[in-house]
Image (spheres, rainbow, N blue to C red):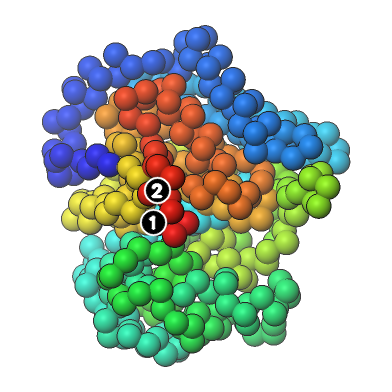
Amino acid sequence: MQKFAVAFILACVLLPCVARSAEKTPSAASSRVQSAIIAAVEKDRKLYGGRTPLPAVLIGVWDGRGASFVRAFGYADLAKKRPLTPADHFRIGSNTKTFVVSVILQLIEEKKLSLDDAVSRFPLGVNIPNGDKITVRELCNMRSGLFEAFNTPQFARLNMAVPKNFDSRKLVAWAVKQKPYFAPGKGYHYSNTNYLLLGLIIGEITKDSVGDQIRKRLLEPFVLKQTTYPQTEAMPDPWAHGYGLDKQRNWEDVSNTVPVAFMGSAGEMISDMADMKRWIKLYATGKTGGPATYRPLTECRQFLGNTAFGLGINCSAGWYGYTGALPGYNTADYYFPATDTTIIAWITYQAEKPPEGVASVIFRDIARVMTPANVPFVYTSEELRRSGF
């Protein structure tokens, strides 16, 4: 894992170096590069599909020279045979967490909390065991040890039916009744409970909903007009349907099978490629939280192979970004500062394996073409076994 060698305030000094590096790297305008990317995507569509390839894949590559390559594969709606387009909206799942962290970092800039504040400082309406030992930082970097809310028996019994007067406090309350994975700060375990709690903290500090804070602080100022924190299951047109595999390994439409009331600040948002291309660069370069919080954001700690995790950001081989996955959707958005390159890889399917997700595999295969000396998400079978994934 490569970390930034200098602070955010020195970014302007590096720009000439970035330009020189970009001159030596593959160009997204090259027909050879584009052919290699198409071949990699088509291979993955077949490898991770069912009886037929993945229903839809949307990829975008933008390099430091201003060249780009955007391609949609397959159908946004299998039943109607409507081809996927770059304008289609997707559920971005856990990419929502990058927006939540950005609001947290802005509140830190405003001196309304700190990364080292204990969760017990905030009256959240739910009792958190060890709340005096779990910090905001540990929620952000998945080191609280809190049990996964969506793996509790109480959540399973709901069978995706939203109870009356339901809110995320109920999910958190169920999670904290389960045995923690480890003591606070003593390990890494991806748990959506952390981000449901961060949403509650934002609400308590601002006396506003996390969705409204994301809209006011991020979507409107950064002009992300196709990005929403929705209140219903409705998708804006045009949109890509999400799919799963049935027992015969045929594709079935699973769009809108997870109510937004359950996703919340862990994964509720919707966006399109153009917005997320802009967003991930802003996020990875510290523009969405503020200069003073940039270093903590990207101080990543290794957890699998050459991959590490910061404050709601994956860091691997010089790439910085995030992924999202929920039934029917898997999205990966990454930025490579060394050559000012962005890669987006979105699919309309959530697979159980591989652990990094199929969208991340497609991103990695495109990165092999664009940055062959910096290939992300590389690990051995032994590292995978030890990690518990």
Describe the element under mark 2 as helix, strand or loop. helix
Vertical relation: 306 (above or below) 170: above
What numbered label is drawn on residue 37? none
Which kind of residue does numbered mark 2 sit on?
Glu
Q: Residue at x 49, y 29 (%)?
A: 365
- Is residue 90 something that shows in the picture? yes
Picture coordinates of residue 30 (x, y %)? Answer: 47, 10
Q: Going by the image, does 105 lie left or right of 10?
A: right
Which kind of residue does numbered mark 1 sit on?
Arg
Vertical relation: 245 (above or below) 214: above
| Pointer 2 local density, CA inside 10 Å: few below 14, some 14–19, many at least 20 | few
Extreme top residue here? 31
Picture coordinates of residue 168 (x, y %)? Answer: 54, 77
Picture coordinates of residue 305 (x, y %)? Answer: 35, 45
Describe the element under mark 1 as helix, strand or loop. helix
Distance of label 1 from label 2 (alpha carbons): 6 Å
Vertical relation: 268 (above or below) 85: below
Disc 1 designates what residue?
386
Disc 2 designates what residue?
382
- The reply to whether the C-beta atoms of the residues labelled 1 and 2 are less than 8 Å apart is yes
- Comparing 231 with 27, the one in front is 27
Question: Which of the 4 image quadrants contains residue 41?
Answer: top right
Give the quarter of the figure containing the N terminus: top left
Q: Going by the image, does 251 lie left or right of 31?
A: right
- Comparing 298 with 49, the one in front is 49
